[in-house]
Image (spheres, helix red, strand yellow):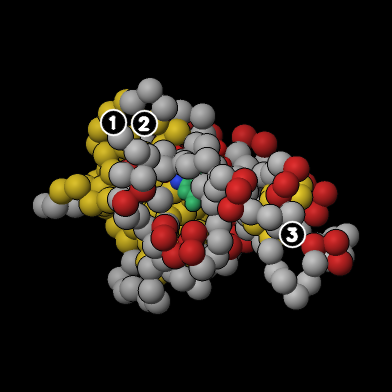
Amino acid sequence: MTSDVLGTLTYGMYAIGVKCGEKVSACIVNTVQQVAYGPDVISVSVSHDNYSNECIRKSGLFTVSVLSEDTSGAVIGALGFSSGRDGDKLKNINYRVLAEGVPVVRENICCWFLCKVVGTAETRSHTVFLAEVVAGSDSVKGKPMTYEYYHRVIKGRAPKNAPTFRENKPKKELNSENWVCTICGYVYNDPLVPFEELSDDWICPICGAPKTAFRRASST
Ligand SMILES: Cc1cc2nc3c(=O)[nH]c(=O)nc-3n(C[C@H](O)[C@H](O)[C@H](O)COP(=O)(O)O)c2cc1C
């Protein structure tokens, strides 16, 4: 079977808010779906390697913020390519903490909901959390961002911990004018401004990596 088969599955884009004791954190996922109603139950697939997995296991709670097409790629970069184990991922992010102690990411989101874990299923790489929706927004704003929109319009990539991770495009589709971010795989190819002419403090628009983290496509 070709991996393109599973590439036809469709997803949304979400920020998951978590707590570990007093500490709050968040990560990006594309794998939220409603799996039952009365009560409403959703599932989300979270890598065993993610700090968020540990937090959800310990607290039994998490929030889901539905990202909109207006959510900036930089927010996805800040939450989707580094671990809460290594620092405060929310330091430049707009969020609020609910009475339950879990944060809700508020960066141009459509809506949010609070989830209480009611079950888990294990795979070799990911835990699938089943969770009841216990509270949430009273209204919905904007247009939800799809995973396809994130790839096509924002030109973002997903890292290895995403269950839908795919290797970068084969090199033959890139040329030596393209520069590739070694952190998130973003490809810089603005024909009007050559990469070399970008200022030294320019950063990757997706993950915030410095210019020095980029490699010319032909040499990656
Ligand atoms: C577009 C996108 C989709 C992602 N989807 C998932 C997902 O569904 N499940 C998952 O475990 N990680 C997913 N990730 C990866 C996590 O966001 C990433 O590993 C993050 O660094 C985990 O942070 P943490 O260690 O603080 O939990 C995704 C990342 C991106 C950018």
Instruction: Identify the residue at horizontal 60%, vertical 39% (top origin).
Output: 83
Instruction: Count residues near mark 2 (Cα–Cα under 10 Å), then give few for <14, some for 14-19, many for 20+.
Output: some
Q: Secondary structure at mark 1?
A: strand
Instruction: Identify the residue at horizontal 32%, vertical 61% (top origin).
Output: 136
Q: Amino acid at mark 2?
A: Thr
State the CA–CA distance, disc 1 to disc 3: 46 Å
- Looking at the image, residue 72 lies above or below residue 90: below
Circle 1 or circle 2, nearest the eye:
2
State the CA–CA distance, disc 3 to disc 2: 40 Å
Query: Of the numbered discs in the image, which one, if any, rests on residue 120?
Result: 1
From the image, tell me which residue sits under label 2.
127
Q: Amino acid at mark 1?
A: Thr
Q: Earlier in the sequence, mark 3 or mark 2?
A: 2
Q: Earlier in the sequence, mark 1 or mark 2?
A: 1
Q: Left or right: where does residue 28 sit relative to residue 1? A: right
Confirm whether residue 108 shows in the render.
Answer: no
State the CA–CA distance, disc 1 to disc 2: 7 Å
Report if the beta carbon of the residue with label 2 is closer than 8 angstroms to ligand 1. no
Report if the beta carbon of the residue with label 3 is closer than 8 angstroms to ligand 1. no
Residue 43: percent from left, percent from top = 28, 43
Q: Check contact, mark 1 vs mark 3: CB within 8 A.
A: no
Query: Of the numbered discs in the image, which one, if any, rests on residue 177?
Result: 3
User: For the image shown, how many numbered marks are present on the structure?
Assistant: 3
